[in-house]
Amino acid sequence: MGAQALGALRHRNYRLFFIGQTVFTLGSWMQGIALPWVTLERTHSAFLLGVLGLVQYLPMIVAGPVGGMIADRLPKRTVLQLTLTLFTLVGLFLYAMSWRGTDHYWVLLVTAAVWGLIQLVDAPCRQAASLEVVGPEDLLSVISLNTTTWNAAAVIGPVVAGVVVATIGAPWCFLATSIASLCGILSLVFMHSLPVVLREGQQPSRWQHIVEGARVAMGQPVIVWLMIVTLAFSVLASNRMTLLPLLSMGRLHSGAWGFGILIAAGGMGALIANRVFAAHGRRLGGRAHFWVALGWATALVLCGISQWVVLTALLLVAAGAFRMWFLAATGSRIQTLTPDASRGRTMTFYAQATTTGAAVSPLEAGGVAALVGAPFALAAGAGACLLVAIGVRLLQPQAFTSKGEPGGD
């Protein structure tokens, strides 16, 4: 009974994997804070910072299906050991370049592209491996632990990174990323008797799923409108890694530690929302979905107006919570509205659309911020999302109601 209560953690292999993944995720967040901050210090350009964000996402847009194909066809522990080795080398390279003062913008740009290429393979492989280590009986436990780990790392990692950058310098964040990657490798080395689960036979490509999913989605107006709202939020409200360093260096005068605090605030909001969502045990329906969208956009508009770092952090906690609830509601409602036979294809199309939107977001935010400033870019983007949500509610009321959805509000 006690072992069952531990869920996935009762498996030795998963405990090792979980520890390695937690340490690696913390290290990744530290690099995620240090890289845009160093870029901004070197270039003092909002637009070039936005280009950096786009370049890091570009591999996922262009070659997203490749990562899933590798995860399906090669032993996952071998692939993860390779990707973690590459992450280690990238971190050491950034550490050396920044320590010597030769981390020019083109160096940072190439490094971001390489990091994105490695993530293209690492992310789907890591997700699949965590499920295969324990088996289907602990699937929900693994998903819950993975979500909690990510959200907790999104709080701790940025705070630590902000303090490190502000006190002893960004190079140490890059070194910490390399050490965290090595810890991930060690956890894989000590795992034993792992199953090798490879997909057999000819499978439809992810691009086929995307095209077929688009066709199915286009045949259902409610899904189309939900995707329009989600795409607007992905492009115009998912730009924190571009705009928050600009706010910290500019209006808020809070420096690197303030940037870390602001990013951590969003992570704290997501962590709180996830706990509330789990305790509530009931998915959000259409009407609640609408108010959550308004809450997310409103919190970001107020962030663009705020001139105090503490107030901005509190607003970002709210924005992080609303964001998590919004995305959870969108995913569950689209799945509910989609026929069983085409659900996988529709969700593949939805995932690709939101990923593309999130990739475009840094460039959009950086370009607007370069013209009119980061505060206005943040408030205007969120304000546009507010108008889109209200417009869809007026034009297609069923998009934000629960008619035909079991269990809705």
Image (cartoon, helix red, strand yellow):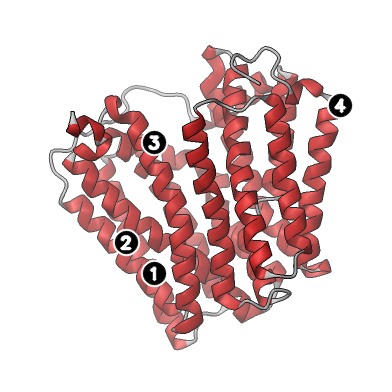
Pointers 1 and 2 in contact (C-beta within 8 Å)? yes
Spatial CA span between label 3 and label 1: 28 Å
Spatial CA span between label 2 and label 3: 22 Å
Pointers 2 and 3 in contact (C-beta within 8 Å)? no
The residue where tag 4 is placed is: 395
Q: Residue at x 28, y 25 (%)?
A: 137
Of the residues under marks 3 and 4, which one precedes in the sequence?
A: 3
Q: Residue at x 82, y 24 (%)?
A: 396
Q: Residues within 10 Å of mark 3 (few under 14, many from 20)?
A: some
Looking at the picture, does residue 236 appear above or below residue 52? above
Q: Position of residue 360 (x, y in %)?
A: 67, 51
- On the question of residue 243 being in view, the answer is no
Q: Secondary structure at mark 1?
A: helix
Q: Which corner quadrant holds the C terminus?
A: top right
Of the residues under marks 4 and 2, which one precedes in the sequence?
A: 2
Amino acid on which disc 3 is placed: Ile
The residue where tag 1 is placed is: 91
